[in-house]
Amino acid sequence: MILFLLCFYALPALSAQESSVTVVGQNIPVSEVLSQIESQTKYSFAFVNSNFNTNRKITIRLHDADLKTVLDKLLADTDYTYTIRKNLIFLSTTKTSKKKENLVHVKDTKESPLVSVKVDKELNEEIKIMPVDLSLPSESKHVTLESISSAKDSLDLNKMVDILNNLTDWRPIQAKTPLWAVKSNLLFDITSSIAFGTEFKVGERYSIDLSFSYNPWEFNVNKNMKHILVQPEIRYWLCEPFSGHFFGLHGVYAYYNLTGLPFSDYMKSSRLQGDLYGVGFSYGYQWGMSKRWSLEGNFGMGYVHADYDRYACKNCKKFLGSESKNFFTPTKASLSVIYFIK
């Protein structure tokens, strides 16, 4: 199973195919249109400021349309535009809005390589543009709102989003991220075990995963993999829960009745029945396939204590004694299909 999992780590990251969007509504609020778009794509909306009117009514009928066509129709006759970054669609105003005093760095291709834009509290009066390079003249240039607006309109929209990202009083509305998911470990499934789990987001970069495996089947007298396995794990995500790389700290408990396993002569000629306890660290990665589906690989190592009774095969009924062992071993191996509930 370990080799099987490692093979999947070599696979490139999966990316969802862009799909067409169907949005239909008669005099419906914009918020409903946004929800329809989010439900059919991998994107979520974020707002550059909180003045965007999601209660505005709109009539729209677009079937199997390109996403950009839908967004152009949605924002027509408004003061807003959009830009797409990764899985987010930023909605930003095309007009200068009032803000508190901040310092923003932008590139000036004509004069200084870097200038600072100082936005005064009384924005309706004036804005000062000052060179950052100390070797440049220290006197400030005074420009009107009209000239700033003209310069802003000539900038690329992506640059404007970068500027807004640096404003200290700008906070985008939290994009919708999954909160709860259910999953099934394919590596356990192929051994005929019943494997399922669930995971909850508990912080900006933390989640709790709880996985189970149950195998009640008796293949024959000399070969069985009966067990009940529970593995709780707390995860730290490098980006955000349910996306990309993560590290985990997990515990493991199992009650098992194993017969004729081919991993060693000792296990192949014995039936081992008992309890196992352990703790370990794991690394994993999650590939997003769509808004509701994802694929996750996870592998961990840890320290295990096992208590068991040993029986001799072939009939596996002759009692050979009770033993216990402590050892380092792989404690987690999964390739899971995930479905997001919320």
Image (tube, rainbow, N blue to C red):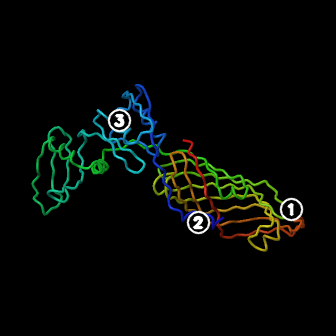
Specify the quadrant of the image occupied by residue 107: bottom left
The amino acid beneath tag 2 is: Cys
Residue appearing at x 40%, y 42% in the figure: 67
Q: Quadrant of the N terminus?
A: bottom right
Residue at image point 37% right, 50% down: 85
User: Which structural element holds mark 2?
Assistant: helix
Q: Name which residue type carries label 1.
A: Val
Residue at (31, 40) in percent of width and height: 81
The first of marks 1 and 2 along the sequence is 2
Which residue was labeled with disc 1? 221
Quadrant in the picture for the C terminus:
top right
Q: CA distance from mark 3 to mark 1?
A: 68 Å
The picture places residue 45, in percent across and down from the top left corner, at: 40, 42
* Furthest residue toward top: 27
Between the C-alphas of marks 2 and 3, the distance is 45 Å
The answer to whether marks 2 and 3 mark residues whose Cβ atoms lie closer than 8 Å is no
Left or right side of 278 for 128: left
Residue located beneath label 2 in the image: 7
Indicate left or right for 265 with 81 as reference. Answer: right
Q: Is residue 179 left or right of residue 220?
A: left
Residue 244 point in image, percent of width and height = 49, 56
Q: Is residue 261 left or right of residue 120?
A: right
Q: Is residue 312 or residue 289 the one in the foreground? A: 289
Instruction: Return the residue nearer the eye: 227 or 263.
Output: 263
Residue 316 image position (x, y, % from top left):
87, 65
Disc nearer the start of the sequence (3/1): 3
Q: Which type of secondary structure does the marked residue at label 1 adopt?
A: loop
Callout in the foreground (1, 2): 2
In this view, the mark in front (2 or 3): 3
Res 73 label: 3
Q: What residue occupies the far bottom of the structure in this picture? A: 265
